[in-house]
């Protein structure tokens, strides 16, 4: 283009030409002249580039917080923690779990080497402390969680008892001097355990009632077991729930829905009807009469076809629990933003032993302390068991769960069962898919939102299936996988943005709670990898002092 003359091509023609370029070339041609620069920053152009490059459905609008399509393209391109900056190799066996402190200054790692390690999250991450749990007969550490003020660390582990029976235990470690404060039995071990508040944690116990029927008891424990007065409880029973068809309660976590207060005050209040598991209608007959009638029918040969031992046990358990269960709490998950109510979320089931349902139980204010009777409030004979306030069915094996930072959304990793499969034997669950589905549920409505996220895979059969931990930040969700990669998706656009390479199964991922451009991944290859975004890497490199030795030598030579 000659100086002072008009443009050789109109903007509309340049726009059509630029549509054939990728984003790198568009940025390059924008350096040619002012006209090309203006067209290269056109909003409609970058909108097309965005949908084309990221393969986002055209039905999905731009993120509400985005200023422009150009900035939004740059955000997804430049702020994903996909650059490996450090590999931590202090563990000598599979690394199973990672957890950050709420301040983001520390994180903990659990491993098959039976240690829990505390790391200092600085520019170069360094090991601060390592606790070996083998002296307590643990086989390995599997999970950890900092309490709300980061003064205590909950560590969950597995130990092998008599006859190779596996059970679990929870330890509480002080972050002030890394001393072990208390230990609590936890059964089954994949209950994991969690904090309810700063000083109280939740554990589980399992009591067998029959071959495939059991009772799960959830306990509230004081982190400081050595209390000064013998009149002060260190433990209190929270809930007692019957399990059918070999199912058990596992993977407990607490959702504090008072965190989610945005835009709720202006909305009309609404409540959800309890969605408890429905039992067959007996035509108005009471449960006790129904149980007696069932026994009479068996004795007189009126039950046809003949029931197997498993079917008989399940039927009796269903009739028994009908007359011995406390009704669910009303007004579950009220949208009152001032509510301080918390909810216990866990995996469970009703058809087979593999976890395929999510149970939700409200924790009332008087239940949030160990004060009061050790066995909780007095129970009538017709309230021997607690019912679930809500149940979410997942047609598949649940292998991971995580909450969004505001506790509004629940993300669930699952491996689907075949469509229309029928489970006739609870000890023989259906085969599960290799592809992992990452479901998203709104805890305000208890409904699934968006479509399931996909990309990651798992290969272990259902009888050997293990947990794949995921984590959620403000804008992203990440998960491990058995295909030797960690994965990152954008929460708004539902697209996979990055695959993070390891040499073996990736068991756990963790975003920094204060810096979502920092992500950790833990793998069976015994390493923890540290990933930062391209933007964060550039900022860190700019902060590093540049060597001035040659310049200083040159100045000294000039003076001489």
Image (cartoon, grey):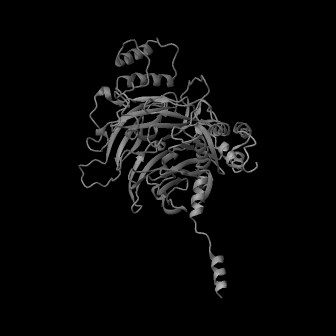
Compared across the picture, whether 178 is left or right of 453 comes to left
Looking at the image, residue 58 lies above or below residue 550: above
Reply above or below: 160 against 376: below
Q: Residue at x 51, y 41 (%)?
A: 65
Left or right: 3 in relation to 295:
right
Where's residue 9, x and y in %?
74, 40
> Residue drawn 73% across and 42% down?
21
Give how far across and how far down residue 209 sits, in percent.
42, 32
Direction front: furthest residue: 4
Q: Report which quarter residue 6 is drawn in.
A: top right
Q: Quadrant of residue 93?
A: bottom right
The answer to whether one can see residue 156 in this image is no
State left or right for residue 89 relative to residue 175: right
Please tell me which residue lies in front, 328 or 517.
517
User: x%, y% of residue 145?
Assistant: 45, 50
In the image, what residue occupies the spot 37% across and 44% down?
A: 196
> Looking at this rendering, what residue extends furthest in the bottom direction?
560
Q: Position of residue 53 (x, y in %)?
A: 67, 40
Residue 54 or 384: which is nearer the viewer? 54
Of the 4 image quadrants, the one containing the C terminus is bottom right
- Residue 371 in sight from this viewpoint: yes
Q: How many marks?
A: 0
- Left or right of 558? Residue 285 is left
Residue 140 or residue 387, whichever sits in front: 387
Q: Nearer the viewer, residue 432 or 128?
A: 128
- The residue positioned 61% from the left and 38% from the top of the image is 495
Residue 498: quarter of image: top right
């Amino acid at each position: 283009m000659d100086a002072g003359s008009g443009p050789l091509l109109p903007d509309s023609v340049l726009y059509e030409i630029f549509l054939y370029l990728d984003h790198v070339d568009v940025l390059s041609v924008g350096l040619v002249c002012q006209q090309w620069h203006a067209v290269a920053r056109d909003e409609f152009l970058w909108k097309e580039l965005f949908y084309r490059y990221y393969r986002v459905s055209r039905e999905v609008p731009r993120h509400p917080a985005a200023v422009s399509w150009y900035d939004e393209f740059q955000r997804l391109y430049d702020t994903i923690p996909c650059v490996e900056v450090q590999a931590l190799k202090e563990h000598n066996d599979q690394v199973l779990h990672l957890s950050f402190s709420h301040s983001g200054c520390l994180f903990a790692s659990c491993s098959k080497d039976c240690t829990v390690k505390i790391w200092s999250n600085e520019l170069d991450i360094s090991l601060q402390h390592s606790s070996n749990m083998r002296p307590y007969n643990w086989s390995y550490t599997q999970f950890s969680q900092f309490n709300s003020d980061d003064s205590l660390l909950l560590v969950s582990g597995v130990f092998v008892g008599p006859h190779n029976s596996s059970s679990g235990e929870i330890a509480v470690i002080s972050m002030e001097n890394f001393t072990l404060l208390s230990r609590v039995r936890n059964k089954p071990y994949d209950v994991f355990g969690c904090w309810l508040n700063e000083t109280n944690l939740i554990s589980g116990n399992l009591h067998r009632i029959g071959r495939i029927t059991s009772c799960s008891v959830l306990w509230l424990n004081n982190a400081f077991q050595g209390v000064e007065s013998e009149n002060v409880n260190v433990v209190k029973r929270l809930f007692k729930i019957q399990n059918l068809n070999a199912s058990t309660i596992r993977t407990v976590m607490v959702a504090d829905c008072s965190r989610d207060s945005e835009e709720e005050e202006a909305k009309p209040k609404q409540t959800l009807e309890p969605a408890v598991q429905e039992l067959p209608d007996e035509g108005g007959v009471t449960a006790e009469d129904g149980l007696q009638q069932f026994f009479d029918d068996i004795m007189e040969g009126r039950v046809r076809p003949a029931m197997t031992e498993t079917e008989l046990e399940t039927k009796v358990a269903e009739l028994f629990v009908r007359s011995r269960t406390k009704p669910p709490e009303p007004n579950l998950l009220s949208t009152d933003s001032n509510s301080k109510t918390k909810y216990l979320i866990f995996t469970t089931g009703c058809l087979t032993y593999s976890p395929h349902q999510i149970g939700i139980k409200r924790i009332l204010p008087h239940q949030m302390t160990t004060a009061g009777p050790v066995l909780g409030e007095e129970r009538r004979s017709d309230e021997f068991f607690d019912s679930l306030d809500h149940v979410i069915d997942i047609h598949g094996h649940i292998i991971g769960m995580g909450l969004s930072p505001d506790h509004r959304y629940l993300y669930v990793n699952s491996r689907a069962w075949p469509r229309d499969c029928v489970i006739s034997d609870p000890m023989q669950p259906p085969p599960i898919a290799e592809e992992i589905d990452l479901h998203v549920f709104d805890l305000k409505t208890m409904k699934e939102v968006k479509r399931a996220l996909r990309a990651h895979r798992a290969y272990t059969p259902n009888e050997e299936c293990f947990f794949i931990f995921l984590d959620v930040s403000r804008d992203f969700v990440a998960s491990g996988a058995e295909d030797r990669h960690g994965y990152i998706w954008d929460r708004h656009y539902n697209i996979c943005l990055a695959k993070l390479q390891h040499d073996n199964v990736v068991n756990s991922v963790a975003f920094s709670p204060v810096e979502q451009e920092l992500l950790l991944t833990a793998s069976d290859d015994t390493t923890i990898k540290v990933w930062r975004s391209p933007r964060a890497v550039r900022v860190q490199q700019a902060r590093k002092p540049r060597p001035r030795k040659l310049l200083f030598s040159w100045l000294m030579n000039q003076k001489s």
